[in-house]
């Protein structure tokens, strides 16, 4: 009964490189959410996806960040030309239904460090 | 915009009760959640309460909701060292599926 899986768990990149973070939702879940947690802060919503569709990207920075959830395979959060300020923990969550009636289950996170 | 506030730290002795408090600003909050985050791990849902409830109890956990004051609390009875973690309060409101999180309360349990 695998939960939400994220990899890698830790990622180190130099400024200007690309970071790719992967998320496999819980079995049977078709809704994926990405959050960012800066040190000593709560989680901030970034983007909500269903299979092959971006439903809400209101929390995504306008540049360098993109997300996808293809028909097959995990959801990918991609950060191009990383900067030190991108260093954070990135969490993925999944749910079976949209809306507050169905709880989001979180993965263990990917901790991105930009040197 | 919507805001969820928590105190940052709470220190208790093992065996005592812990009470973690949270206030929120959105009067249309529908679900309120408590998540636990252990070091280096993701968030684990502990419990949630629907806004038309005043209280919910689940083993050692008791959630109290005061809608008038927009105040939510989590009481952990007989606190153990394994309860040491960061506890996040969150809510969803107005049909939104996106929870708004507080900054988290670090619970430190000492012998």
Image (cartoon, coloured by chain):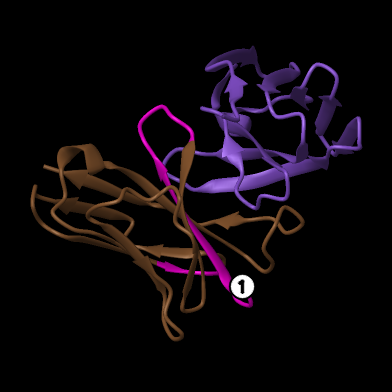
Span highlighted in magenta in the image? A23-42
Residue at label 1? A29
Residue visible at 84% across and 37% down in the picture: B51
Task: Judge whether A31 appears above or below A111 on screen.
Answer: below
Q: Quadrant of residue A40?
A: top left
Q: Which chain is brown?
A: A
Decide: is A54 above or below A59. Answer: below
Q: Check disc 1 and report its element: helix, strand or loop.
A: loop
- Count of marks, rendered view: 1
Q: Tell me which corner region of the image, top left, top right, bottom left or bottom right, holds residue A31.
A: bottom right
Q: Is residue A79 left or right of residue B74?
A: left
Chain B: give its colour. purple
Residue drawn at point x = 85 percent, y = 22 percent: B66
Q: Residue A59, percent across and down?
A: 43, 47
Query: Residue A42: x and y, percent?
Result: 48, 33
Q: Work out whether residue B86 or residue B110 is closer to the camera in this orientation and state it.
A: B86
Residue A57, image x and y in percent? 44, 56
Q: Is residue B47 visible?
A: yes
* Chain at numbered mark 1: A
């Amino acid at each position: 009964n695998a939960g939400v899986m994220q990899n890698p768990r830790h990622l180190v990149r130099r400024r200007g490189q690309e970071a790719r973070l992967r998320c496999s939702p819980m079995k049977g879940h078709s809704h994926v959410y990405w959050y960012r947690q800066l040190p000593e802060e709560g989680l901030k919503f970034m983007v909500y996806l269903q299979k092959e569709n971006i439903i809400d990207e209101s929390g995504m920075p306008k540049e360098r960040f993109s997300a996808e959830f293809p028909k097959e395979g995990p959801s990918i959060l991609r950060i191009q030309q990383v900067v030190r300020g991108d260093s954070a923990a990135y969490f993925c969550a999944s749910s079976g239904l949209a809306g507050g009636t169905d709880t989001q289950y979180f993965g263990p996170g990917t901790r991105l460090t930009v040197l | 915009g919507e805001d969820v506030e928590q105190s940052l730290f709470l220190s208790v002795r093992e065996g005592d009760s812990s009470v973690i408090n949270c206030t929120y600003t959105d009067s249309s909050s529908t679900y309120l959640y408590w998540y636990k985050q252990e070091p280096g791990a993701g968030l684990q849902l502990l419990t949630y309460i629907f806004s038309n409830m005043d209280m919910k109890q689940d083993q050692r956990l008791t959630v109290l909701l005061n809608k008038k004051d927009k105040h939510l609390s989590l009481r952990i009875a007989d606190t153990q060292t394994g309860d040491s973690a960061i506890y996040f309060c969150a809510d969803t409101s107005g049909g939104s599926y996106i929870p708004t999180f507080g900054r988290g309360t670090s619970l430190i349990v000492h012998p």
